[in-house]
Amino acid sequence: MYLKQSKYKKTGRTYLSIVRGYWDSDCKQSRTKTIKTLGYLDELEKEYPDPIAHFEQVVVDMNQAEAEENQPIAITINLSEKIKEGSRRMRYGYAPLSRIYHDLAIHSFVNSRARSLNVKYIPNNILKLLCFERLLAPGSKKKAHENKNRYFENTDFSLDDVYGFLSLLIKYKDDLQVHLHQRIKTLYERATELVYYDVTNYYFEIDEEDELKKRGVSKEHRPDPIIQMGLFMDAMGIPISYQLFPGNTNDCETVRPMLAKLKRDYEIGRVIIVADKGNNTAKNVNYHVMRGDGYVYSQTIRGGQKELKDYVFDEDGYTWIGDDYKIKSRIYPREISVIGNNGKQAKKRIAEKQILFYSRDYDRRAKAEREPALKKAMELVNNPAKYNKATSYGAAKYVKNLEYDKETGEILTLKKMPIFDEEKLREEERFDGYYAIVTSELDKSDQEIIEIYRGLWRIEESFKVTKSDLKTRPVFLSRQDRIESHFLICFIALTIIRILQHKLKGKYSANQILDSLRNMECTNVEENIYIFDYEDNVIRDLGACLGIDFSRKYMTFGEIKKSLADVKKSL
């Protein structure tokens, strides 16, 4: 509040009033509201020796009283006021995201490079918006731009600026990932002796392929062109780096170039790479061993050699742990074929530890996961006309005599009727509950290796987070540079939410955290007063963890801006 002096030109008289300044979020400008009218200065001089000095002190006292904790503020509500067009809800759930964004010094990275860009907008403001929107309301870049006024931030940029920034951002993809790694290493003591690796793909609902979008083996069994993404993650579950590959690239061909780049750019020493059986190839194993690195891979049993299967089902050597779990291991020479310096193929033997275990829980889970496919197979046998080559996926392997029309994909039944393959089912059930892991780390105990491998679930979950919570697809972009920037933004967003999970000690899933942050909004009720109407355990724990007070039901515009400014003070 302050003392306002209004001088009227016609009379030359000065009128005094006490007013409150506030920010009009609808008009995006400062406004004032009269709190108390005082009268003309010449009239007040008859009552006070110095009316201006007197009422300026009154204003000081009023501001001081209002600033004291738990002092009520009078709000005038006009019951006949009409609803204004558009939403007056503002996002506040981005405060924790902003804290991590600034702790990682992403703003510093972008601002330092923005000096060389000939643009009128502030690039960091665009990147912040795109990262926060990806976490709070994932959608198109156009939709993110439409939502920009729901943030208490400087959003003075156009939609064209957003698209132009995407074309510039991708130039810094590699440098930004290295920057994030260095900050995480400093802040969270990241260790890189263990790195987890996996590959997924993202489909595009288009027909034509290009340099990056190619038809390949889709994780979701779709015919659309896809992009492959390889992702490295540390033992805390926080992403380290990613790389995109054409959709027709085999999973096993992605790890070597990524690992070489990781060790070179990140200055990382010996690593033990942990991945699933899709990367367990002779080329990859030889690559790790020749460079002094280690590996922990799962090993297929069903597709393994007869000698391995015989070893798995031989009860000799197993140690039962309780009634539900048994384990055994051996050091066994692995023979692999490699291409020598002369370009010729040669055989090579390496020592490898094989760990075999059986779990009744895994056994039950395997049977439960197979049940829908078996049910579908029985339906297919009884009513083959309901299915075709595409819709019979998953069930077809349990059905004999399946023949498809080459053009339509329909199941043909003129020669032979489909019958359920009981022998196939019995053969598969033999392997239920058994699991094999192979490793170069001969000195580590069986339990150590198993615990290391179990960490792989975090990277699999990370892909689920990107596809469900962050809605990385569909990609509402066509230019390759902008598509690649889209995935970089998703990578940053994934890193931020994973760090929040780490700070909360894994107490909540990414979905739980994001759901709470998305509900954390406020409404401008009068002048510069905002009301908050959501709180839960996640919000309380985040506040305690990050040192942010989320308990206030009412806050002024100035208090909100100060709170958001405080979270930007990076570590």
Image (tube, grey):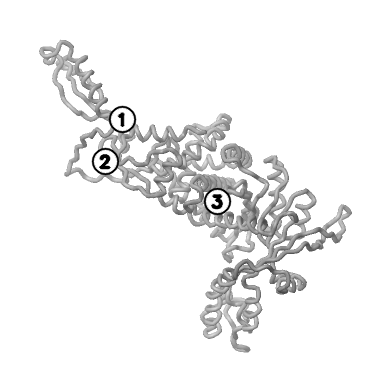
Q: 10 Å neighbourhood of mark 1: few (<14), some, or many (≥20)?
A: few
Rendered image quadrant of residue 455: bottom right
x and y percentages locating residue 214 in the rendered image: 63, 58
Q: 10 Å neighbourhood of mark 3: few (<14), some, or many (≥20)?
A: few
Position above or below: 437 against 44: below
Q: Which residue is mark 3?
A: 478
Position above or below: 323 against 5: below
Position above or below: 41 against 64: above
Amino acid residing under circle 1: Ser
Mark found first going from the N terminus, 2 or 1: 1
x and y percentages locating residue 10 in the rendered image: 16, 17
Residue drawn at x 51%, y 56% is 474
**Mark 3–mark 1 contact, CB under 8 Å?**
no
Report the mark closest to the observer, 3 or 2.
Answer: 2
**Which label number is shown at residue 569?**
none
Q: Which residue is mark 1?
A: 30
Which residue occupies the foreground of this view, 359 or 4?
359
Q: Is residue 249 left or right of residue 96?
A: right
x and y percentages locating residue 465 in the rendered image: 52, 54
Q: Is residue 291 left or right of residue 157?
A: right
Mark found first going from the N terminus, 3 or 1: 1
Q: Could you tell me which secondary element the residue under label 1 belongs to?
A: strand
Q: 10 Å neighbourhood of mark 2: few (<14), some, or many (≥20)?
A: some
Q: Could you tell me which secondary element the residue under label 3 belongs to?
A: loop
Q: Which residue is mark 2?
A: 525
Residue drawn at x 52%, y 79% is 375
Rendered image quadrant of residue 7: top left
Report the mark closest to the observer, 3 or 1.
Answer: 1
Q: Could you tell me which secondary element the residue under label 2 belongs to?
A: strand
Number of disc labels: 3
Quadrant for the N terminus in the image? top left
